[in-house]
C-alpha cells in the first residue's frame, strides 16, 4: 500500500515538474527558428568561433568546440579539458551525443545540418547578417545574454563596442576615405563591397567605396574577381586585404608578396601607407565575436591613421 502511495506521489510530482518547466520555458528566436529554454544551460557546446568568442566574454566555458584554426584570443580552448567537436563545417555527431548538451550554439557554416543538430539538443543558430553586421550581432548577444542570465554583462559589452564604433565613424566622417576591400585566394583576387561579409567597413565604420570605371570585374559567388590593373585604376585611399589562405591555414604571408608590385604601389593607399592586412581570424572565421569585433575596429583605425 505504501509503495503504491509513494509511486503515485512520485508520478504526481513528475507531472508538476513537467508542467512547471512548460510554464516557465521561454521561447527565443534565432536565425533559423526558435528554441525553448526553461533554465540556464549548464552543458553547452559551441560549434563556431564567433559565438565561442562571445560566450567566453560572458564567462561561459563550453564543454566542446572545433579546435582546428582556433583564433589566438581563444587559444585556451586547445587544452584537453575541452572536447573537439569536429571542424567549422562538420560536427562529429557521436561526440555531440556523448557530451549530452542541453544547448548547442551553431553558426552559418552549419546551416545545412541544423535539423540534425536540433535532434540532438536545443540548437541556437548564431548567424550574422552581412547586410547588418553590428545590428544582428547585438541581437544575438542580447538573446544569449538572456539565455545565460548574463544581461548586465552583455549590456556592458555592447556599450563598450558601440563606443568604439562611434569613435571610428567620427574619424571616417572627417577623412571620408575611399576604401577597396579585397581577398587574396591563391593567385585570385576578389573585391567586396557594402553587401558582403565585409559590410561592416562601409555600413558601420562609414568608409566610402572605391571602384574602377575603366577596368572590368567578373562577378563571382564570393566577391568580384579583379586584377591588379583594377586596383591601380580604382585609386583607393585605403586598401584592405584579407589573406584567405592564411585564414584557413593553407599558407601564411603569401598575400604580402603578391601585392608587392608596381600597380599597387601606384595607389594613394600605398603612397600614404594606408594598406592594411586584415586579421584573418577576426574577419573570416569569427564573425560576431567580442574580441574579433574589437580587432576589426583596430584594423580599420590603423588603416586611416
Image (cartoon, grey):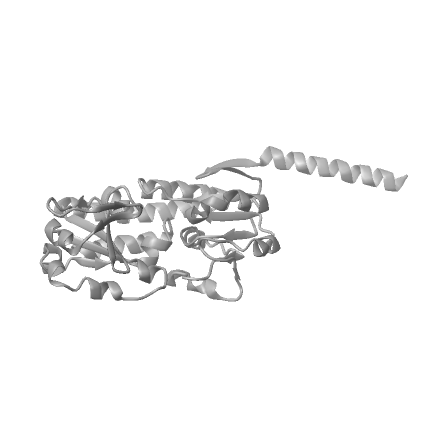
User: Who is closer to the viewer here, 283 or 298?
Assistant: 283
User: Who is closer to the viewer here, 219 or 157?
Assistant: 219
Across and down, in percent, residue 28 comes to 49, 37
Q: How many marks?
A: 0
Decide if residue 305 is in sight here: no
User: Who is closer to the viewer here, 188 or 30?
Assistant: 188
Across and down, in percent, residue 170 comes to 19, 45
Across and down, in percent, residue 143 comes to 45, 41
The residue located at (37%, 47%) in the rendering is 156
29 w.r.t. 56: above or below: above
**13 with respect to 77 (left or right):** right
298 w.r.t. 135: above or below: below
Across and down, in percent, residue 233 comes to 10, 51
**210 with respect to 30 (left or right):** left
Decide if residue 234 is in sight here: yes
**199 with respect to 269 (left or right):** right
The residue located at (37%, 53%) in the rendering is 286
Amino acid at each position: 500500500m505504501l509503495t503504491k502511495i509513494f509511486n503515485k506521489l512520485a508520478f504526481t510530482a513528475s507531472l508538476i515538474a513537467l508542467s512547471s518547466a512548460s510554464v516557465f520555458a521561454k521561447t527565443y528566436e534565432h536565425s533559423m527558428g526558435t528554441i525553448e529554454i526553461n533554465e540556464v544551460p549548464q552543458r553547452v557546446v559551441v560549434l563556431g568561433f564567433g559565438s565561442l568568442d562571445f560566450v567566453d566574454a560572458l564567462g561561459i566555458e563550453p564543454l566542446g568546440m572545433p579546435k582546428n584554426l582556433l583564433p589566438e584570443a581563444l587559444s585556451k580552448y586547445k587544452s584537453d579539458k575541452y572536447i573537439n567537436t569536429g571542424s567549422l563545417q562538420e560536427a562529429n555527431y557521436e561526440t555531440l551525443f556523448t557530451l549530452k548538451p542541453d544547448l548547442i550554439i551553431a553558426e552559418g557554416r552549419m546551416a545545412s545540418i541544423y535539423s540534425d543538430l536540433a535532434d540532438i539538443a536545443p540548437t541556437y543558430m548564431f548567424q550574422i547578417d552581412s547586410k547588418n553586421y553590428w545590428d544582428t550581432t547585438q541581437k544575438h548577444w542580447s538573446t544569449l545574454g538572456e539565455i545565460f542570465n548574463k544581461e548586465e554583462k552583455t549590456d556592458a559589452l555592447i556599450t563598450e563596442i558601440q563606443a568604439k564604433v562611434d569613435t571610428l565613424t567620427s574619424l571616417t566622417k572627417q577623412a571620408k576615405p575611399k576604401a577597396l576591400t579585397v581577398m587574396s585566394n591563391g593567385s585570385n583576387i576578389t573585391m567586396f563591397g557594402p553587401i558582403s561579409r565585409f559590410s561592416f567597413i562601409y555600413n558601420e565604420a562609414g568608409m566610402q567605396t572605391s571602384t574602377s570605371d575603366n577596368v572590368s570585374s567578373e562577378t563571382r559567388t564570393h566577391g568580384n574577381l579583379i586584377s591588379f590593373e583594377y586596383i591601380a585604376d580604382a585609386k583607393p585611399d585605403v586598401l584592405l586585404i584579407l589573406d584567405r589562405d592564411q585564414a584557413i591555414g593553407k599558407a601564411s604571408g603569401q598575400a604580402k608578396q603578391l601585392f608587392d608590385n608596381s600597380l599597387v604601389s601606384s595607389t594613394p593607399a600605398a603612397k600614404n601607407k594606408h594598406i592594411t592586412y586584415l586579421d584573418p581570424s577576426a574577419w573570416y572565421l569569427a564573425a560576431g565575436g567580442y574580441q574579433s569585433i574589437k580587432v576589426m575596429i583596430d584594423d580599420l583605425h590603423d588603416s586611416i591613421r
